[in-house]
Amino acid sequence: MSGTPDTALEQALALSHRLLEAADQSNFEQVTILDAERLSLLQSLRLQRDSMSEGARLMLRQVAELNERAIRLVDHRQRIKQRELDLAAVGRRAVSVYSTTR
């Protein structure tokens, strides 16, 4: 993947920013693709975790923070979508009730 932990973390951080942007745009297919790519990078660093520099640890914390923001954003978008579906279902039921009373 990459030569140094810092390079891999820089790439993971960039992917995290792109992932957050995709989540903000409700592009969940892109979120899934970016998350898988980022996960591959982060898994390649597992064995090097104990020997990471302070700068690398900071980048790792930033990746984690962006990940939490993306999770909250996706969850929020899903709740909005569920509310819209619930309202549509209520509307369909109302239409079917009122259409039989004519």
Image (tube, rainbow, N blue to C red):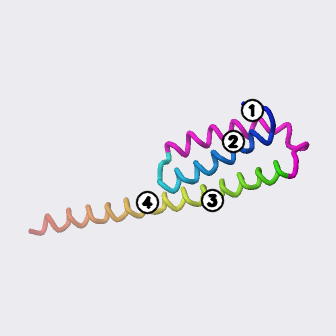
List the residue tagged with mark 2: 11
Question: Dot 1 surroundings within 10 Å: few (below 14), some, or many (20 or more)?
Answer: few
Query: CA–CA distance between discs 3 and 4?
Result: 20 Å
**Label 4 with label 1: CB-CB less than 8 Å:** no
Kind of residue sitting beneath label 1: Ser
Asked if residue 31 lies in the magenta stretch, the reply is yes
Q: Which stretch appears magenta?
A: 29-54
Percent coordinates x, y for residue 91 in the rendering: 27, 65
* Residue 77 sits above or below residue 32 on the image: below
Sequence-first disc among 4 and 1:
1
Kind of residue sitting beneath label 3: Arg
Q: Looking at the rendering, which quadrant does residue 51 occupy?
A: top right
Sequence-first disc among 3 and 4:
3
* In front of the other: 14 or 23: 14
Q: Secondary structure at mark 4?
A: helix
Percent coordinates x, y for residue 49 in the rendering: 85, 43
Kind of residue sitting beneath label 2: Gln
Query: CA–CA distance between discs 1 and 2?
Result: 9 Å
Q: Tell me the chief SS of the magenta region.
A: helix
Query: CA–CA distance between discs 4 and 2?
Result: 34 Å
**Label 1 with label 2: CB-CB less than 8 Å:** yes
List the residue tagged with mark 4: 82
Q: Secondary structure at mark 1?
A: loop
Percent coordinates x, y for residue 102 in the rendering: 8, 68
What residue is drawn where x is 86% and y is 38%?
A: 48
List the residue tagged with mark 1: 2
Badge nearest the viewer, 2 or 3: 2
List the residue tagged with mark 3: 69
